[in-house]
Image (tube, helix red, strand yellow):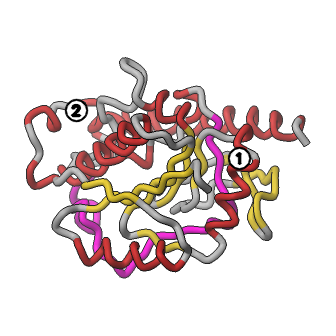
Amino acid sequence: MKDLQTWVINLDRAPDRLARVSAQLQRLQLPFRRLPAVDARALTAEQRAALDEAAYRRKHGMSPVPGELGCYLSHVAVMRAFLVSDAGFALVLEDDVLLTDSLPAVLQGLMRHAGRWDVVKLSAVHRGTPQRCLEVAPGHRLAVMLSRCTGSSAYLMNRRAAQAYLREGDGLLPMQLPYDHVFDQGWRFGLKVRLVTPQPCGHDAQIESTIGTSAGTSRKFHWTRRLPAFAYRLGNEGRRLAYGLREALRERRQR
């Protein structure tokens, strides 16, 4: 997999998390580069300006926390580093990811079928109503998602995807939602976004999040102030469904 570069997003103050993911990657014989995560405790004025707080409140129905911005900007930093490298594909991992033994075979299968995707989610929080279309490794299939499928612990992208995400004006910046609510919007970025099911990666629930969100609903606005967020989500899921059905039809034509 000489055309693949693996990136691990890791805070300088979290060496234990780096050691944990490093051991997993060593076991799978996947060399990697560490990307120093943007630390929410030391955000610069320029980094803070990358958040459109009004849009975030309107679309998400709650107040943002600095850790979300740090996470978001860290993923953007990976894309910039990827594009100045010689790699054709980037495997992006957050340092609380769990990797299964099937990951290398899945990656090889995905790269053999590189024309079928631009971004592939390798872990997910929600199921995503997957429409399976292509076996990429024994027991693992590439799928189109018809419903919400959050999480960004592990994903694979090509250079076209990174370029689309970094476009001026219609790319990822400024931040208006948490990263994992945005980067899989294939209809917005003009990308083929897919999922591998079952996922070869997961989230290690035993590791405490460094984003800094608190449990419960303390960040959420009263439901009367969340009406714009409800409207946004309804429209967004409608667009997701329409996109997914169109992409599933495209996949069927390629069989």
Q: Looking at the picture, how far across and down is residue 217, in whole percent?
A: 28, 61
In the displayed image of the protein, which residue is found farthest to the top?
A: 169
Q: Residue at x 47, y 29 (%)?
A: 163
Amino acid type at circle 1 is Val
**Residue 175, image x, y percentages:** 30, 35
Residue 202 lies, with reference to residue 134, above or below; the image says: below
Q: Is residue 183 left or right of residue 168?
A: right
Query: Where, by quadrant of the figure, is residue 122 drawn?
Result: bottom right
Q: Are marks 2 and 1 in contact (CB under 8 Å)?
A: no
Whole-angstrom CA distance, mark 2 to mark 1, is 31 Å
Q: Residues within 10 Å of mark 2 (few under 14, many from 20)?
A: some
Highlighted range, magenta:
192-220
Secondary structure state at the residue bearing disc 2: loop
Query: Residue sitting at 61 percent across and 39 percent down?
Result: 118
The three-letter code of the residue at mark 2 reads Ala
Q: Residue drawn at (66%, 38%), measured in percent from left and top?
A: 241
Residue 110, position in %: x, y?
Answer: 69, 52
Is 80 displayed left or right of 102 in the figure? Answer: left
Badge 2 is on which residue? 50
Q: Main secondary structure of the magenta part?
A: loop
Q: Is residue 105 visible?
A: yes
Q: Position of residue 6 (x, y in %)?
A: 47, 56
Left or right of residue 192: residue 68: left
Which part of the image, by quadrant, shows the N terminus?
A: bottom right
Q: Is residue 202 magenta?
A: yes
Q: Is residue 139 above or below residue 69?
A: below
Residue occupied by mark 1? 144
Q: Nearer the viewer, residue 249 or 71?
A: 71
